[in-house]
Every structure is written in C-alpha cells, then in structure tokens.
Image: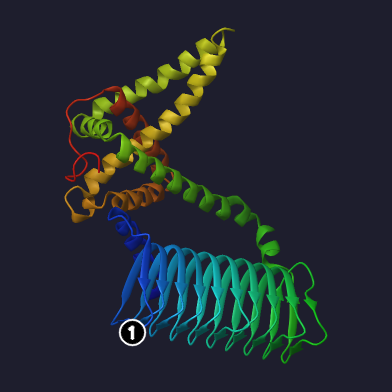
Amino acid sequence: MRKIALFFLLLTSFLVAEEEKIENYIIVPRGETIEGDYFAAGNTVEISGHVTGDLYVTGSRIFIDGVVDGDVLFLCGEITISGHIKRDLRGSAGHVEIVGSVDGGVSALAISLDLASRAQIDGSLVAVAATTDLASKIGRDANIFSSYLRVSDQINGNLYAHVAKLRITSNAQIGKNLHYWSNDKALIDKGARIKGKLVHEPSFLKDITSKSFLKKIKIGSTMAVFMMNLFYSFLIGLVLLRYYRPKIDASIANISTQPVRTFFVGVLIAICLPIASLIFLLTIVGAPFALTLVALNVIGFYLAKVLFILWALQATFGRTRIIHYERTALFFTLVIYLLLVHIPYVGILLSIVATLTGVGSVALGPRGVAPITDKGRGD
C-alpha cells in the first residue's frame, strides 16, 4: 500500500509541476550529491550524480547512470537504468531498459521491458509488458505477464510466466521451477538448464473468459471506457480553461445562481433539438443540415457535461489551496465524477443532471462572471 500511495503521489506531483511549467531538462551531474529524497519532473531527466535517499522521477525520457541509495519510483515515456540502485525499482513506462544493477527488486509496467546482459537484479522481478527480454541475472523469483517472453540468462529462483509465447534459450538457467501458463508450448533449447519442475498449463485467460459471470461484467471494457472518458474529459477541460475562460466563468455563474432554471432550460433544449433534426431529415434539402445538427448535438452534450464538472470543481475545491492548481483539481474532480456515474441508478441520474445542467448554463448566456480561480484570466 505504501508503494501505491507513493506512485499516486508521483502522478500528483507531475500534475502540480505542470502548473509551474516543467523545465525541458533536469540534470544531476556526475560528482554532485543530493542528500535525502529527490523529486524530478521534466521532459528529459538525467541522474548521473548520487542521491542518498529515494528518487521520484517523471518525464518523457529518463536516464539514470548514477547511484541512488534508496528506492526509485518512475512514471515516464522511456527509462534507461545504467547506474546503481541500492534498493527497489518501481514504476511504469513505455519502454524500460536496465543495463546497470539493482540491489533490490524490480516491478515494472511497460510496453517493452529489456534487461541487458550486463544488468544485475539481486531481488525478484515482477513485470507486466507486451514484450519482455530477460538477458540478465535475476537473484530471486521472476513473475512475468507478457505477450512474448525471452529468457537467455540465469534466474536463481522460480519463473512464473503468463504468456502467449515463451522462448528459453540455451544460455538460460532456472534455479528452481519453471511454471508457465500459455496456449502454446514453449520453445526450449536443449542446452537450457531447469533444476526444478517444468509445468505447463493452459492460459488462465482462457479459463477466465469461459466463465459467464466475468463475461457479463466485462471488466476490461469497463476499465477501457473509464480511462478514455477520463482522458478526453481532462483534455477538453484543459482546452476550455485555456481558451474559453470568460464563457466558462459565465456558465459556472449560471449554475451557481440559478441551478433549477438552468436544468429546465437544458431539458427544453434536449427535447427541441431532436425534433428539429427530425424535421430537417424529412426534407431532401435539409438532410445534410440534420446530420450536421445531430453531430453537433453529440459534441455539444459531451462538452456540456464537462462544464458541469468544472462547476463541481469550483464547488468542491473553491475554498481550498488545491484550486490554485487547476489541472490537478480538474483531474481529481473528473476521477470522482466518473466513479460516481458507475454507481447503479445514481450514476445514470447524475449523468443526466450534469449534461442537461451544462446545456442550460450555456443557453442562458452571461449572467455575471464568477472566476473559477483567483489566478486571473488567461492563466
């Protein structure tokens, strides 16, 4: 739980750092020593010096070729570890490459994970990746979830692999058991040494998807929809705050001062617009206008929901220090809203109220301005 909390803190620090315009390059040069924990957020981060505490780092490209006495927690596009980490390495990236040494364990979520032959992992490895190449020594057990896994060096403990394809080369040595779940048989060279048992079972995904109760709840689809809604709503919210602040402030003022009227105006518009679209659609000349109006309705109603969320942001964080960090506050408000709309019955009602209220707030037009923050327009 501590690691999860620290990972969430790293994401929050990245969002807050965005408010303060992250530097393009963050560099800790060789020979420099940083006492205690160190937080770094930038487009490119290079750690060539010595960090005596934990390292929390985020950005597009991360290079660590120095020494870190504590844990390393990362969230980035790609990371290369060629230095020495004396405790654990934890995080998520598009591409993770380890060339150096890690005295503790490694836990990684990535698209691709590469452990070079010069690398050394003294602890255990837990990885979720599309492709995984293990060409380094691993001191303890390895637990891998991957589409493709290749092992070409020594694993002192057990290897547990949930994979589509498994390749064990002649250079591979597994000190204990090899237990893998796959619908295909592993390709294992004759020279490979497995000291324990070799166990092959069908993919657990096949068993899971065959169970009717898991088919009904569709966990994967629900999570995908949640993440896409969060991403698009967050992006739209940032655009609205950046380029349409006067109109946003006016809409929020309408919801705050006359919420009932705003809602019923939205209801009236929701009734009239489909009727207008249908009338246009019945005429040959008006058909293109009808299709355009339908498309604008879909976009407009989605934007209206975001307006309601921005009002909720003001109502929730307006009297706290968090409101000074608009993007952070927007992110957390969106998460809370999207969690609430997944509650049966309550979620449907909340979604309808949010959409119609947002539509009504725009239709009423300016009724006075109540800025969403005290940072000023154009922020």
Vertical side of 202 occupied by 229: above or below: above
Vertical side of 215 occupied by 115: above or below: below
Residue at the location (81% across, 82% down)?
Answer: 189
Quadrant location, the C terminus: top left
Q: Position of residue 6 (x, y in %)?
A: 36, 71
Amino acid type, callout 1: Thr
In this picture, residue 173 sits left or right of residue 249: right
In this picture, residue 131 sits left or right of residue 254: right
Classify mark 1: residues with Cα within 10 Å, few (<14), some (14-19) or many (20+): some
Q: Position of residue 268 (x, y in %)?
A: 35, 20
Vertical side of 360 occupied by 32: above or below: below
Quadrant location, the N terminus: bottom left
Q: How is the image coloured?
A: rainbow
Decide which of 29, 179 is in the foreground and name it: 29
What residue does disc 1 label? 52
Query: Which element carries disc 1, helix, strand or loop?
Result: loop
Decide which of 325, 47 is in the foreground and name it: 47
Q: How many numbered marks appear?
A: 1
Vertical side of 259 occupied by 164: above or below: below
Decide which of 254, 156 is in the foreground and name it: 156
Rendered image quadrant of residue 145: bottom right
Rendered image quadrant of residue 210: bottom right
Q: Position of residue 143 (x, y in %)?
A: 60, 77
Residue at the location (57% across, 88% down)?
Answer: 140
In this picture, residue 125 sits left or right of residue 70: right
Residue projecting furthest to the right = 190
Q: Position of residue 85 (x, y in %)?
A: 45, 83
Residue at the location (43% across, 81% down)?
Answer: 66
